Image: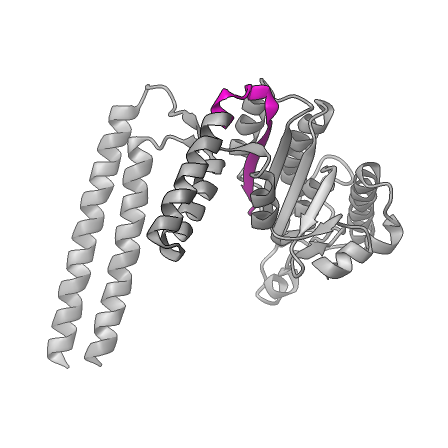
Amino acid sequence: MEFLAEYASFLAKTATLVIAVLVVLSAFAGLRGKGRRKAGGQLQVTRLNDFYKELRERLDSGLLEKAQLKLLRKQQAKADKKSKKAKPSDKRRVFVLDFDGDIKASATDNLRHEITALLTLATPQDEVVLRLESGGGLVHSYGLASSQLARIRQAGIPLTVCIDKVAASGGYMMACIAEKIVSAPFAVIGSIGVVAQLPNVNRLLKKHDIDVEVLTAGEYKRTLTVFGENTEKGREKFQEDLDVTHQLFKDFVGRYRPQLHIDEVATGEVWLGVAALNRQLVDELGTSDEYLSTCAREANLFHLHYAEHKSLPQRIGMSASGAVESGLVSLWSKLGRLR
């Protein structure tokens, strides 16, 4: 047991030293970067047709005999030569975006730049496809994300949203803006509702003779609080605010999807893709892979991704976080084996 204690102490000291060094390096990098311009980002453009072509060629190489493969390559070379002679306008363009939403809709920061870029050259003959995954989150955050997609509709450019896993609550608020929603059969759709919850520890504080003073200027500056004593009037006002937000949500969805029986689907319930299609929450069943591979046969596909440049302090901070996490995992696993 003494050996285990000494070994654990040694590992703890080592981890502490590593953390201290990383903190010092991070602080030094922060001082060097102070006063410099904030790190920007860069728009990355990938031609997806090449990706699908490479997949097909690899499969051909594995399945066909040498003579068959040679003949196929010859035919493809002729087709490519003919395609190069065609005018660029002969094929429409499809711009592919991704949105992986957290509770704060943080991906909006990149989405806004991607949309700004494509709107500089996209035309009504093109199409924008958004691969959307989100279970929802803060109202104002997803309101902004939805407003970004509305810019595409306002420009008269066809917008399609593909949902492979989930587009609920704020996620569906974004999806409903599309002229066409394509959902995987078992994707989670809907949750047109509003929810808020918070704990209240006022009775616990009173039990220990702890007073909490909540001072406000304005009758409804605070309705429900965590520490103060909540009143029935405050609860009623809080519920009223939720109802108003819910009505705005319903009106928003109804404006973009007038075919919905909004009161029937705006109950906060969710449906899988098949059931969502029956309720007209989505327009087609299918995966994003299926939809894009079909588009690639007759259109030029471009994937847009705005990548933020991480500053040196940010990179060091991420490295430090990873090192600490790895060190702790290693420490606990070694102690576990020793026991």
Q: Is residue 31 left or right of residue 228?
A: left
Q: Which residues are magenta?
A: 83-102
185 to 298, vertically: above or below: below
The residue positioned 65% from the left and 33% from the top of the image is: 144
Look at the picture and state if 146 lies above or below 101: above
Say left or right for 306 vs 323. Answer: right
Of the pair 67 and 8, the residue shown nearer to us:
67
Q: Nearer the viewer, residue 243 or 164?
A: 164
Identify the residue at horizontal 58%, vertical 18% (top origin). Answer: 121
Q: Position of residue 109 (x, y in %)?
A: 53, 32
* Visible residue check, residue 219: yes
Residue 241 is one of the magenta-drawn residues: no
Specify the quadrant of the image occupied by residue 271: bottom right
Is residue 212 visible in the rendered image? The answer is: no
Numbered-mark total = 0
Where does residue 33 sit, x and y in percent of width and height?
29, 25
Q: Quadrant of residue 245?
A: top right
As for residue 96 lying within the magenta part, the answer is yes
Residue located at (50% from left, 20% from top) = 85
Instruction: From the top left corner, tell me how far across and down residue 70 is, in percent.
Output: 36, 44
Q: Residue at x 32, y 43 (%)?
A: 318
Taking 201 as reference, is 295 above or below it?
A: above
Left or right: residue 229 versus residue 212 is right
